[in-house]
Image (spheres, rainbow, N blue to C red):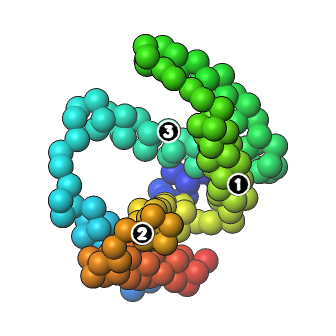
């Protein structure tokens, strides 16, 4: 059994302290992560409004759930079976939860089918890809790759919804991808 990302991170910290990891690799990784986070701030903060406490709490819970999902994914040996099992476990919750929280719920066949395609097929493929990649990625690479999601969503909006491709979008995307690239490069040099 391989150690989880938390154990791996502590081993990296220990190796840094003992001088086993060259300083430039550590610096490259830190600069890459900070670079990607700066790009996220440039992309998301201008025009952003403070979310409600409920929305903020839901985002934090979602983030923590994704962390647990990703940590679990590093130990998975059969990505397809695990992803299918996760979707089977989540389906009853996805079907029942809206009934509890939306009194005037209306569902038509077209909307339901679009939800199935977007939720089960498209997301299922993305989760399967993620679970397939996690066992071969270092924790820092995996976590930094997640920072590409807002870029991809924004560029999807440009391509499919006709949203404007602004200088802010192009600049932030370039900064985020550069930071991700620096972190991946540092992980490859260290391994």
Q: Which residue is mark 2?
A: 162
Task: Please give left or right for residue 85 compared with residue 141 in the image.
Answer: right
The kind of secondary structure element at disc 3 is helix
Circles 1 and 2, Cβ within 8 Å, touching? The answer is: no
Give the number of the disc on residue 141: none
Point out the tag, 1 or 2, that comes first from the N-terminus.
Answer: 1
Tell me if residue 33 comes above or below residue 62 in the rendering.
Answer: below
Circles 3 and 2, Cβ within 8 Å, touching? The answer is: no
Give the number of the disc on residue 125: 1
Q: Position of residue 183 (x, y in %)?
A: 46, 76
Measure the alpha-carbon separation of dots 3 and 1: 19 Å
Tell me if residue 86 comes above or below residue 35 in the rendering.
Answer: above
The kind of secondary structure element at disc 2 is loop
Can you say which quadrant of the picture contains the C terminus? bottom right
Question: How many numbered circles are shown?
Answer: 3
Residue nearest the viewer, comparing 124 with 136: 124
């Amino acid at each position: 059994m391989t150690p989880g990302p938390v154990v791996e991170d502590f081993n990296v910290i220990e190796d840094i302290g003992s001088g086993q990891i060259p300083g430039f690799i550590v610096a490259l990784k830190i600069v890459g992560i900070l670079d990607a986070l700066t790009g996220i701030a440039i992309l998301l903060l201008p025009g952003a409004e403070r979310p409600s406490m409920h929305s903020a709490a839901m985002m934090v819970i979602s983030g923590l759930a994704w962390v647990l999902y990703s940590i679990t994914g590093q130990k998975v040996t059969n990505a397809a079976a695990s992803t299918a099992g996760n979707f089977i476990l989540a389906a009853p919750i996805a079907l029942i939860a809206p009934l509890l929280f939306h009194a005037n719920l209306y569902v038509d066949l077209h909307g339901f089918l679009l939800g199935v395609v977007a939720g089960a097929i498209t997301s299922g493929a993305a989760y399967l890809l993620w679970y397939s990649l996690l066992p071969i990625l270092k924790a820092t690479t995996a976590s930094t790759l997640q920072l590409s999601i807002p870029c991809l969503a924004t560029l999807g909006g440009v391509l499919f919804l006709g949203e404007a491709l602004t200088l802010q979008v192009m600049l932030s995307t370039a900064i985020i991808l550069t930071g991700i690239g620096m972190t991946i490069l540092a992980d490859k040099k260290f391994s």
